[in-house]
Image: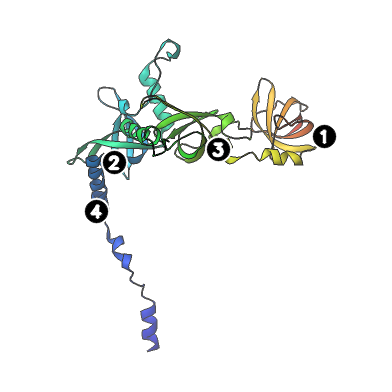
Amino acid sequence: MQNEQNTITNVPVLILDSDAVLETAQSKADLIWHEIQNAYRTKKILTGMLGGIEKTENGSLIAIVYYKDFRTVIPITEMMINLVQDESHDYGDISLRQNKVLNNMLGCEIDFIVKGLDAQSRSVVASRKEAMLKKRQIFYLDRDASGNSKIYEDRIVQARVVAVAEKVVRAEIFGVETSILARDLSFDWLGDARERFHVGEHILVRILSVTAESLDKITVKADVKSVEGNTSKENMKKCKIQGKYAGTVEDIHKGTVFVRLSIGVNAIAHSCYDNRTVGKKDEVSFVVTHIDEDRNVAVGLISRIIRQNL
C-alpha cells in the first residue's frame, strides 16, 4: 500500500492549463495571422519592433517590422521620417539620410496600421504614418468635457526611445517625435547619453510645452531630469572645500573638464596637475576649491589621474 501511495504522488499533477502546451507552432502562427487580419479590418493600431532595412528592386527603402515573428513591410514614405529639405538643410542624397535615420532606429518599438495582406504568402504591408496620425488625433487634438487634451504641459507621460546619440535622445510621445538634449536628460553630468538610454526602452518624461495646430503641425518639448529629481543638491552637503574626492570624467569641452564625483556631485575642473592628458571616463582625484551654489556644482582641480580609460 505504501509503494502504491508513493507511485501516485510522484506523478505530475494534471492542471487545467495543460492543454496550453499542446499548442503547436503552426496553430500559434494561425492565431497571430487571425489577429493581424482582424486588425486590418478594424484599422487597429499594432505595435512591433523595427528589425531591418531593405531595398526593393527599384531601389526604394523599406522598413521591416516584426509583429510576433510576422514580417511586416513599411515603405519609407509611410515611416513618418520628416527630413527638412531646404537650402539650409541640404545634407545631400535624401535616401542616404533616410537610411541613416532608420539605421539609428533599429530595435525600436513602433506602431503601425495594416494596409494590405496576402493570405497566400502571409505577407503584410503597413503604415507607421497612419498609426502616428491616429494617435495624434486621440492624444493631442481630441478634447474631453473640460476642453483639455490627454497630453498637456507638466504632465508626466511614458515615451519610447527611438534613437540615441551621444548628446541627444530621440523619443516618440504618442505619435510625435521629439529630441531631448543631454542637459534635459539628467541633473548629473552626462558625457554620453548612450550609456544610460537605449533604443527600444520606455522612459518617463515631463511635458514642458505642447503646440498642436493640426495633425501635421504638433511640436512637443519634454525632459527626463525633472521626473527623476535632483539628488545632487542633497549630496552637495557632503562636499567640503579642500576635500578630496574620487570621480569620473564625463566630458571635456573647450578645456573645461566635467567630473561626476563618487559622492553624487557634479564638478568642474579647469586644470589637471597630472602630467598625463586627462580623457573621458578616466577615474580622477578631485580637490574642491569652491562650491557654486547657484549652479549646484563643485569647482576645483584634478590632482591626479587614478586610472586612465585607455
**Residue 263 can be seen in this image:** no
**Residue position for label 1:** 242
Q: Report the amino acid beneath label 1.
A: Gln
Q: Does 87 appear above or below 12?
A: above
Assess disc 2: are there few (<14), some (14-19) or many (≥20) residues with their C-alpha within 10 Å of its C-alpha: some
* In-image side of 241 versus 182 (left or right): right
Q: Is mark 3 in CB contact (under 8 Å) with mark 1?
A: no
Q: Report the amino acid beneath label 3.
A: Arg
- Marks 2 and 4 sit apart, C-alpha to C-alpha, by 22 Å
* In-image side of 208 versus 22 (left or right): right
Residue 196's tag is 3
- Marks 3 and 1 sit apart, C-alpha to C-alpha, by 31 Å
**Is label 2 or label 4 in front?**
2
**Residue position for label 4:** 27
Residue at 44% of width from left, 36% of height from top? 151
Q: Report the amino acid beneath label 2.
A: Lys
- Marks 3 and 2 sit apart, C-alpha to C-alpha, by 33 Å
Q: Does 89 appear above or below 124?
A: above
Assess disc 4: are there few (<14), some (14-19) or many (≥20) residues with their C-alpha within 10 Å of its C-alpha: few
Residue 44's tag is 2
In primary-sequence order, the first of circles 1 and 4 is 4
Q: Report the amino acid beneath label 4.
A: Ser
**Is label 2 or label 1 in front?**
2
In primary-sequence order, the first of circles 3 and 1 is 3
Q: In the figure, residue 234 lies in which quadrant?
A: top right
